[in-house]
Image (cartoon, rainbow, N blue to C red):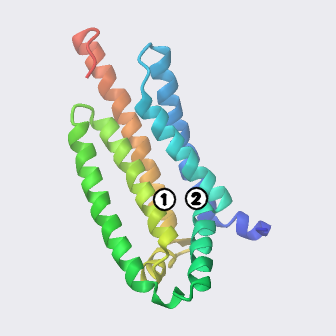
Amino acid sequence: MIAGYEWFSPTRTIGLLSYAVSFGACAWRWLVEGRRGRPSGEFLLLAAVQLGLALDMAFDVRWKLHEFFMTRAMDLHVYGERRDPQLVALVLLGGVSVIVVVWILRRFRSRPGLAVATSGTMLSIGLWFCEMLSYHFMDHVLYSMVGKLMLVSFLWLGLAMTTCYGIWLDVTSVRTVFRGNGAQRR
């Protein structure tokens, strides 16, 4: 059970509010597109992922998964050998994250707002996996204090706001296209 002072820590509150706001932005965009007769599964998917990230902030799913794998490794007597596989997994995660973001930027180059929102969400997923892996040296950086907040809270906030910025950019670019070209959508 989480004590009240742990539940409402400034770091956790920033993460929860950040992903709740980005969920709201993605869900709003999906609803607006649906009302206009242009259903957009991309925004529904982004909203679902952002909701998952917000729920993770509330219920610590990544830490429960980490604890499960840690307990399993201890049962198998391989916990002491975890550092090399964690490092390999982090390097692969970083490489895959770069490749996916480049692919997203190319795939949605005609819709830069959607590309930015999707990239922010994908990088949030990468950060989630990074935290779940819990490599000691990475944890030391992510959970270092910057004032009353952990550094990771600034990353959560930045990535969630990147997603929100992408939604805003998509709204403004689609409006420009509709005003300038009649009913043509990018």
**Disc 1 packing (10 Å; few <14; some 14–19; many ≥20):** many
Task: Judge left or right: residue 6 versus residue 49.
Answer: right
Residue 72 in picture, x, y percent from top left: 60, 77
- The relative height of residue 141 versus residue 81 in the rendered view (above or below) is above
The image quadrant where one finds the C terminus is: top left
Instruction: Give whichever of 152, 104 is nearer the camera.
Output: 104
- The relative height of residue 29 versus residue 98 in the rendered view (above or below) is above
Task: Judge left or right: residue 64 versus residue 176.
Answer: right
Residue 6 in picture, x, y percent from top left: 72, 69
Seen at 64% across and 63% down, the residue is 60
Q: Which mark is residue 87?
A: none
Q: Amino acid at mark 1?
A: Trp
Task: Judge left or right: residue 50 versus residue 165.
Answer: right
Query: For mark 1, what is the residue?
Result: 156
The image quadrant where one finds the N terminus is: bottom right
Seen at 23% across and 38% down, the residue is 107
Query: For mark 2, what is the residue?
Result: 14
- The relative height of residue 3 versus residue 105 in the rendered view (above or below) is below
Seen at 57% across and 48% down, the residue is 52
Determine if residue 148 is in view: no
Which quarter of the figure has residue 148?
bottom right
Instruction: Give whichever of 144, 73 is nearer the camera.
Output: 73
- The relative height of residue 38 versus residue 55 in the rendered view (above or below) is above
Seen at 37% across and 43% down, the residue is 118
Q: Are marks 2 and 1 in contact (CB under 8 Å)?
A: yes
Residue 113 in picture, x, y percent from top left: 32, 36
Q: CA distance from mark 2 to mark 1?
A: 8 Å
Q: Amino acid at mark 2?
A: Ile
Of the image marks 2 and 1, the number of the one nearer the N terminus: 2
Which quarter of the figure has residue 123?
bottom left
